[in-house]
Amino acid sequence: MQNIAIWSEEFGAATDEPILLIMGSMSQGILWPDELVGRLTAGGRRVIRYDHRDTGRSDTVDFAAQPYTWEDIKNDVYRVMDAHGLDSAHLVGHSAGGLLAQLIAVEAPERVRSLTVIAASPLGGGEGQVLLRALTGQPQPEGSLPEPSAEFVDFFRALMAAPPAEDRRGVIDGMIAEQRVLHGTGLPFDEDAARRLQERVFDRARDLSAVANHRLAAAAGPDFEPVGVLDRVKAPTLVIEGSHEPVKPGHGAIIAERIPGARLLIVDGMGHTLPAETHRELADAILTHTAG
């Protein structure tokens, strides 16, 4: 096992039902908004969030000397649970964190009290390949997952061709522009709140550029996702998608179709992020789902 320190924090009473929040690729745990965490804690939950390796305050890695795959990022979830003394927990995953949560529900059902996936793709669906084909202008084979919105594709094509920002302000401006695209078009975009969040992300990162290692990890283990296994999920499952999801539109319905008994919740106006307008509805849904 790789000796990598993972930063985590928990809220609420140790005797409350535990919820482990798993954020998406290249994302710090603080992207689970404080207000949402507070609502879950006030609802009687013990809530844990953490920074993936190579993000935030967790260890960063020299990938050339110490390569890893998404299998290792997934195994970090078990390490966080073990460190907090949890034999099992309610898993709530966002985006790629939802993918990790699906895989854990398949391979270690005894550790998953319930499963909630938000803005995620179905395990085994090859979402990464769909995204790559969209960004490079390749046709999608028949049966592929729905591809991202045109606005998302245009933004990231331009980003890949642009020179890197030269200072803190430029980097944060770019992070805000990306958040705006991920936010979608269904709700007003609060640029002041976005700037506060991205300044916090920038300032607490050990090495902001290390998040690119998550892409290298995906390339190092392209067969990470098992195919055709979602019917094995036994945990009660809630699937949440925004009505204005720009990255994985319609993917939530596919997850809900493939997991027996899963429920689908469409949050009006929400895109791929978790803005303040959605916190009450998200918290209420998660609290109801994790009520035992």
Image: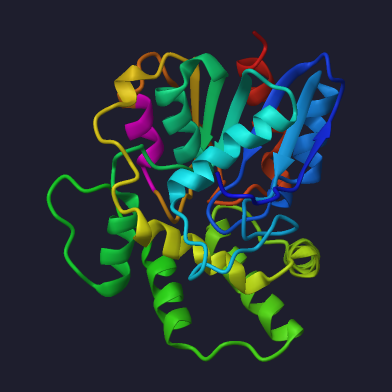
The residue shown at (41%, 25%) is: 107
- Can residue 95 be seen by looking at this rendering? no
Q: Nearer the viewer, residue 109 or 251?
A: 109
Where residue 178 sits in the image (x, y, percent)? 57, 69
Q: Is residue 91 above or below residue 140?
A: above
The residue shown at (48%, 38%) is: 100
In magenta segment, residue 253: yes
The residue shown at (44%, 31%) is: 102
Q: Nearer the viewer, residue 20 or 263?
A: 20
Q: Quadrant of residue 174?
A: bottom right
Q: Nearer the viewer, residue 54 or 194?
A: 54
The range drawn in magenta is 249-256
- Can residue 100 be seen by looking at this rendering? yes
Q: How is the image coloured?
A: rainbow
Q: Nearer the viewer, residue 73 or 102?
A: 73
The secondary structure that most of the magenta stretch takes on is helix
Q: Is residue 287 above or below residue 245?
A: above
Q: Quadrant of the N terminus?
A: top right
Q: Is residue 231 left or right of residue 105?
A: left
In magenta segment, residue 124: no
Where residue 45 sits in the image (x, y, percent)? 77, 21
Q: Quadrant of residue 36?
A: top right
Where residue 49 sits in the image (x, y, percent)? 72, 40
The residue sitting at the left extreme is 142
Where residue 292 sits in the image (x, y, percent)? 64, 8
